[in-house]
Amino acid sequence: MTQTILLTDLVVQTLDLSPAIAVIEPLLKSGDLLEQDATLAFKIDVTRDPMDPRELSEIPEVRLWFIRLDSRYPWLPLVLDWEAGELGRYAAMLVPHQFSPSEGVRYNPEALEIFVMQKIFAISQWLNQQGHTSRTKLKFMTQMLGYEIDDDLFELLRS
């Protein structure tokens, strides 16, 4: 079941994480978040000038909100609704990129690599804390971002 986190002008302008916390914390407290098949999505409802050609991920205030959210929940990409494109949109909020109407999002390759490796480290540690030994979903997440991660890396992280 996908749960939606609503971002409004006030939430973004005040860097208020309470809409996300209100959705995420009950899922965490109710048990194993990964076993619940819960996924998260964002509805970003911010006022924009109709002539503003920027994508939401190009608006500094929106990106800053996502940076703050990612600092609190660095494992969050693992539970986003990937099928609805939430992983790509989340990455676009945190990784420098170019947007083209014909080609879509084109991430800065070095920045995307740093993002992916940071997520591997943070999510792997979180999975260990949750008692999960499987890295299948984490590997699938990195594949969706264009990276094949060797099992040897996860063995290094276990030590």
Image (tube, rainbow, N blue to C red):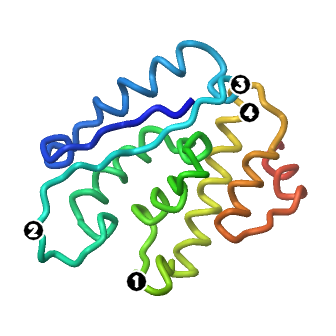
- Report, in whole angstroms, how far the alpha carbon at label 4 lies from the one at label 3: 15 Å
Comes first in the chain, label 3 or label 1: 3
For discs 2 and 3, the disc positioned in front in the rendered view: 2
Crowd rating for badge 4 (residues with CA inside 10 Å; few <14, some 14–19, many 20+): some
Of labels 1 and 2, earlier in sequence is 2
Q: Residue 149 location, x and y as percent? A: 80, 63
Tell me the distance, in whole angstroms, between the alpha carbons under discs 4 and 2: 45 Å
Q: CA distance from mark 2 to mark 3?
A: 42 Å
Of tags 1 and 4, the one toward the viewer is 1
Mark 3 Cα within 10 Å, few/some/many (few <14, many 20+)? few
Picture disc at residue 35: 3
Percent across and percent down for residue 70 are: 44, 47
Residue at 19%, 41% in the rendered image? 11
Sequence-first tag of 4 and 2: 2
The residue at 78%/30% (across/down) is 132
Q: Which residue is mark 4?
A: 128
The kind of residue tagged 2 is Asp
Type of amino acid under label 3: Glu
* Quarter of the view holding residue 146: bottom right
Say what secondary structure mark 3 lies in. Answer: loop
SS of the residue under disc 2: loop
Separation of marks 3 and 1 at Cα, in angstroms: 37 Å
Residue bearing mark 1: 101
Q: Earlier in the sequence, mark 4 or mark 3?
A: 3
Mark 1 element type: loop
* Cα–Cα gap, marks 1 and 2: 19 Å
The numbered mark, 2 or 3, whose residue comes first in the sequence reads 3
